[in-house]
Amino acid sequence: MRSISAKPGQFCRRSVDLAFGRLSPPASLKRIGELLYEITLEEYHAVAVHPTSFGKDGYLDPKEAYYPRFEPHSGFFHNGKPNDLSVMANNCKDEDYRPDAYRVLNIFPNFLVNHYRVLYTWYVSITQYIPVAFDSTVVRSWYYQVPFQGPKASWFHLLFRRWTDLWLPFFVGIYLRRITNEDHVICEAMQMTAGSMIEEPLLGLEEQRIAWFREAYWDALAQLNGQENSDA
């Protein structure tokens, strides 16, 4: 098992504290929560599900993917290196974090945090998946325009960014809702045949985080059952 000294909250506290955000209304979905969450744990679906956005450049080169595991959580760092998670945690603790690539943090059991750049501005999105029935999940999403410190820029660059920051969040919200809806449509279709899946799937390299999530899920259930038995 791999772990780091920092708590998961340290990764996004800096972002949320500084952010001025917009809240997407919660969506009640007739879909299995596990499918909704697991689609955020792999990269293969991007080409088929998001052909005009994440998947427009084809499948991800495995060399560009780094998957940190800090049990029971995990992440995806584009062009990441083995020590990046610890460096990120320490930088956040020192309030000196400066992202340079797309990153995703899946906080077990039901939080998704990612950050990405649009034009010259960085954003952080937070999504919570709340199962309310075996076939229904409430999804709440927030996205924030984040003033991460960037490299020194010219006065023209700063002026241009100040102008685009006025209207860019509106279009980012539209884009995020489209991406999210594309995932939801696929999960709803998969749910129709999910009951016939009785064997564990064969997972590829870019799906290994699904296996990590399921391990953590069953470990959590075992611990809960153990507590209930001891209290009985």
Image: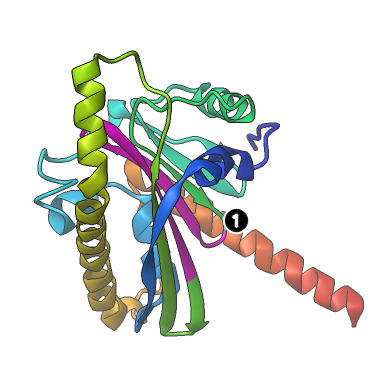
Question: Image point 19% across, 46% down: which residue?
Answer: 54
List the single residue furthest toward the right. 231
Residue 119, position as x, y percentages in the image = 20, 34
Res. 201 visible in picture: no
Say how the picture is coloured.
rainbow
Asked if residue 145 lies left or right of residue 190, the reply is right
Question: Image point 84% across, 77% down: which residue?
Answer: 229
Residue 186, position as x, y percentages in the image = 23, 69
Bin the neighbour count of mark 1 within 10 Å (Cα to Cα): few under 14, some 14-19, many 20 and up: some
In the image, 141 versus 156, the foreground residue is 156
Res. 90 visible in picture: yes
Question: Which residue in the structure is indicated by mark 1?
Answer: 216
Regarding mark 1 in the picture, which secondary structure is present there?
helix
Q: Is residue 131 magenta?
A: no
Specify the amino acid type for callout 1. Answer: Ala
In the image, residue 229 sits, relative to residue 91, either above or below, namely: below
Q: Quadrant of the N terminus?
A: top right
Residue 49, position as x, y percentages in the image = 17, 58
Residue 26, position as x, y percentages in the image = 40, 74
Res. 13 image quadrant: top right
In the image, 153 versus 92, the foreground residue is 153
Q: Is residue 110 magenta?
A: yes
> What secondary structure predominates along the stretch shown in magenta?
strand
Per the rendered image, the range of residues in magenta is 109-129
Q: Quadrant of the C terminus?
A: bottom right
How many numbered discs, if any? 1
Question: Image point 37% across, 22% down: which residue?
Answer: 150
In the image, residue 178 sits, relative to residue 163, either above or below, namely: below
Res. 197 image quadrant: bottom left
Asked if residue 34 lies left or right of residue 178, the reply is right
In the image, residue 67 sits, relative to residue 215, either above or below, namely: above
